[in-house]
Amino acid sequence: MTLSAPSPESAALLARARELLAAHPVVDGHNDLPWALRENVRYDLDRLDVAADQTGRLHTDIPRLRAGGVGAQFWSVYVRCGMSGDDAVSATLEQIDAVRQLLDRYPGDLAAALTADDMESARAQGRIASLMGAEGGHSINNSLATLRALYALGVRYMTLTHNDNVPWADSATDEPRADGLTAFGREVVREMNRLGMLVDLSHVAPATMRDALAVSTAPVIFSHSSARAVCDHVRNIPDDVLALLPGNGGVAMATFVPKFILPEAGEWTLAADNNLRVHGLDHLDTTPEAMKLHEAFEAANPRPIATPATVADHLDHMREIAGIDHIGIGGDYDGTAFTPAGLEDVAGYPNLVAELLDRGWSEPDLAMLTWRNAVRALRDAESVARAEQERRGPSNATIEELDA
């Protein structure tokens, strides 16, 4: 489903949105293109060249990133929770290598970014700043040395959990075990602060969110989560946690995943996911085989449709609770089978900005949402890291010592 042709008033808003994004492009907190490349072509960019329009195969390619006004992207170097131990570490390294292949192949469009200054430099050069985020603490196999190695390879945030608990932190979508963070989990957060790696609290349980905010001396982020008060899904952020962000300096980046933003979409998506499982596929699968099954299911069971207005409802609420300095955008493209109408792919950000303009958001406030907040959070994390590194060296603590 796509939106109908815009009225003259809507077209004017869309033109304003594009002008704003030319000056203040989107920093998107989470895109799963590396995993999509792994699943579809085992990273063979000759078979899936993202310099060309890949509509129908991917949510993301360079022409649509350009059309969407994206100026910086955190590429997720996610691996599934079914991978554990050294297998998870190795797969994460392969994901990092995939991002490096993208950077090497498309240097005119993508620029490696490790710092906030790098993000600003890429924007000045007209390139898309490319950062990496590891999605799930299983990627470090309970090792602070592995955490440091990921940072050295360019990873600038880590989501503490994915859909399953890790031994030191509870996930939002698993049975509580640690009641938040264990002692080792708190040490992970402290070591991330010392490194300058952003602590990402998407996917984690509310108790984990609160524990991390109590420990962290640097801004945290939610790379792709929305407001639980607007859509009561466990993956979203409770109001009391949003209210803590001004004291921390953190940024909550609203996601576009329909089941997280539209209440009616949740039950439908559960049924669609179960349909994949019945056919022997993982419910997170977005390969062509999985998408054909989804399309057949959707034809028989019409899907509730989210729109840019649905996302804007979340952003209105998040701004009210956390403040304009503490919100951003994290679409989760290529990490979800379904997207809102008008936000079908990475070209859609102007539609969201136009919706917010229509609601009376000022251009300075929109610049905070799209660019400035995320850059400021990383810059502040870098400042904290410099101070922490003057005060102490690397932690060599082990989970066995701290959580015995």
Image (cartoon, grey):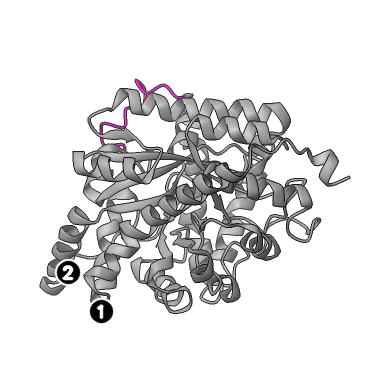
Left or right for 38, reference 63: right
In the image, residue 230 above or below residue 148:
below
Per the model, the C-alpha gap separating discs 2 and 1 is: 11 Å
Q: Which residue is drawn at 53% across and 35% down?
A: 151
> Between tags 2 and 1, which lies in front?
1
Q: Depth check: 365 or 270 in front?
A: 365
In the image, residue 209 above or below residue 125:
below
Residue at the outermost front position: 390
Mark 1 = which residue?
Answer: 360
The 10 Å Cα crowd at callout 1, few under 14, some 14 to 19, many 20 or more, is few
Left or right for 357, reference 323: left
Q: Give amino acid for label 1.
A: Gly
Q: Depth check: 138 or 230 in front?
A: 138
Q: Give amino acid for label 2.
A: Leu
- Is the magenta region chiefly helix, strand or loop? loop
Q: Which region of the structure is painted magenta?
A: 43-54
Residue at the outermost right position: 404
Residue 94 in percent (x, y) is at 53, 25
Residue 155 colored magenta? no
The picture quadrant where one finds residue 31 is: top left
Q: Is mark 2 on a helix, strand or loop?
A: helix
Sequence-wise, the earlier of marks 2 and 1 is: 2
Left or right for 236, reference 97: right
Q: Depth check: 304 or 231 in front?
A: 231
Q: Residue at x 56, y 71 (%)?
A: 244
In the image, residue 182 above or below residue 102:
below
Q: Which mark is residue 13?
A: 2
Residue 247 in percent (x, y) is at 53, 70
Residue 395 in percent (x, y) is at 69, 38
Quadrant where the N terminus sits is bottom left
Left or right for 19, reference 238: left
